[in-house]
């Protein structure tokens, strides 16, 4: 199949729409279920590049959750603690989670609000465990290099058979030069083939703190590869083998850092014992629990705790978390890694990162205020590497 006709483009009024191969060769994608759209394919192809690169760089199964051409989450298949299993809503499953299922649960679970209605990418064969997790979430589709027969049967039952299932040829390699059109004008550039698993990226460490643990290097690698496929400007906080906060597409880098830091803080606050013990009423859907928790730990907690509202979600009215309780809990978040797709222009980014437990940083370097950024890192004992690599993605 050299081309695939689509219902429409980004919006219903944008017709006709299709994907095709310029050179007349077959598409490297096979549609196994559903009717994918224009944005589905944009998410799928960006997400596939991310997870396949993560797989090659780490040697571990990888998954990503994409929304509007940027990742909401990305992770590798490290085992999960009971706490993570609980806040990712997978502590109730009666089957063993494979590495690829674990990677998916992590990628989906870090920012469940943003992952709602996502497109999923899997680096490895989608198995029964992964398909069962996907089946119970609100999602548009999945792309993977292969599916077991049982997994495919499960996924084809989702959304009354309309769920999008794509299989991609893992051996497909695009041409080294890529093109796109904007306003009728064709743009051409070489593909971004930079290797982010090169140890030399950590050779230039201008801070007094010089040591990067093996876990920090792994997490920075995950963060950098995630940023390579995130709309710029972007920064990514990572910990324990997964992205925990992604700030994408902001015009100001400090706003990226704040947005991603807020997401990392929410990820950590969800692990607070008081949040984990919220007395949800029976029958509350996972998506509604996610939304309720997000409001409960925000400054707008009264929206779900006032009389007439809390009864909709809880069996008894929980006490709100005080500002002091939140601050005390957030101070326990440590050893977080932070990567940026370009240099930090000012030390205010490091100030904000420090508040979310960042201890390791990887960024391009090259700002006229590098000295200020370095001094801010030194104030907090943060180790920072100047990679010399910019990762803008548009």
Image (spheres, rainbow, N blue to C red):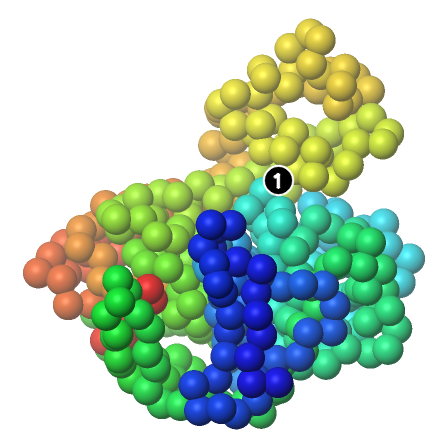
Number of marks: 1
Residue at position x 35%, y 52% from top? 249
In x, y percent, where is residue 170?
Answer: 60, 87
Residue at left offset 58%, top offset 15%: 302
Farthest residue to the left: give it.
Answer: 368
* Left or right: 267 in relation to 126: left
Where is mark 1, residue-wise?
A: 270
Few, some or many C-alpha atoms within 10 Å of disc 1 (few <14, some 14-19, many ≥20)?
A: many
> Where is residue 164 drawn, in percent x and y?
69, 63
Residue at the spot 51% in from the left edge and 70% down from the top edge: 18
Is residue 87 left or right of 219 when viewed as pictured?
right
Q: Is residue 381 above or below residue 23?
A: above
Quadrant where the C terminus is found in the figure:
bottom left
In the rendered image, is residue 383 in sight?
no
Residue 195 higher or lower than 373, as above or below: below
Residue at disc 1, secondary structure: loop
Answer whether residue 12 is visible to the viewer in this image. yes
How far from the left and from the top, in percent, is residue 82? 75, 53
**Is 52 on the left or on the right of 348, as rendered?**
right
Q: Nearer the viewer, residue 293 or 332?
A: 293
In the rendered image, the quadrant that contains the N terminus is bottom right
Residue pictured at 76% horizontal, 15% vertical: 311
């Amino acid at each position: 199949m050299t081309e695939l006709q689509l219902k429409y483009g980004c919006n219903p009024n944008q017709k006709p729409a299709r994907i095709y191969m310029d050179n007349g060769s077959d598409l490297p994608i096979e549609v196994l279920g559903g009717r994918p759209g224009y944005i589905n394919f944009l998410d799928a192809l960006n997400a596939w590049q991310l997870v396949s690169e993560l797989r090659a760089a780490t040697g571990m199964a990888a998954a990503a959750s994409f929304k509007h051409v940027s990742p909401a989450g990305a992770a590798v298949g490290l085992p999960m603690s009971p706490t993570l299993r609980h806040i990712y809503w997978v502590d109730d499953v009666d089957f063993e989670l494979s590495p690829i299922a674990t990677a998916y649960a992590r990628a989906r679970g870090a920012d469940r609000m943003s992952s709602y209605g996502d497109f999923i990418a899997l680096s490895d064969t989608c198995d029964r465990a992964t398909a069962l997790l996907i089946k119970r979430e609100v999602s548009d589709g999945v792309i993977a290099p292969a599916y077991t027969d049982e997994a495919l049967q499960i996924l084809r039952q989702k959304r009354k058979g309309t769920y999008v299932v794509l299989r991609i040829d893992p051996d497909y390699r695009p041409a080294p030069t890529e093109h796109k059109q904007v306003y009728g004008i064709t743009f051409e550039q070489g593909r971004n083939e930079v290797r982010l698993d090169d140890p030399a990226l950590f050779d230039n460490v201008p801070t007094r703190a010089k040591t990067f643990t093996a876990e920090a290097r792994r997490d920075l690698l995950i963060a950098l590869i995630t940023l390579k496929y995130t709309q710029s400007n972007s920064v990514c906080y990572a910990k324990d083998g997964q992205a925990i906060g992604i700030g994408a597409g902001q015009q100001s880098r400090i706003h990226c850092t704040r947005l991603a830091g807020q997401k990392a803080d929410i990820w950590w606050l969800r692990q607070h014992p008081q949040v984990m013990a919220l007395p949800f009423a029976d029958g509350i859907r996972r998506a509604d629990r996610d939304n309720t928790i997000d409001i409960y730990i925000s400054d707008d907690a009264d929206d779900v705790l006032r009389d007439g509202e809390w009864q909709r979600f809880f069996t008894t009215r929980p006490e709100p978390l005080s500002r002091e309780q939140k601050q005390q809990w957030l101070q326990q978040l440590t050893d977080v890694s932070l990567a940026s797709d370009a240099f930090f222009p000012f030390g205010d980014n490091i100030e904000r990162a420090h508040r979310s437990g960042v201890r390791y940083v990887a960024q391009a370097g090259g700002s006229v205020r590098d000295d200020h950024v370095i001094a801010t890192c030194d104030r907090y004992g943060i180790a920072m590497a100047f990679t010399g690599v910019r990762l803008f993605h548009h």
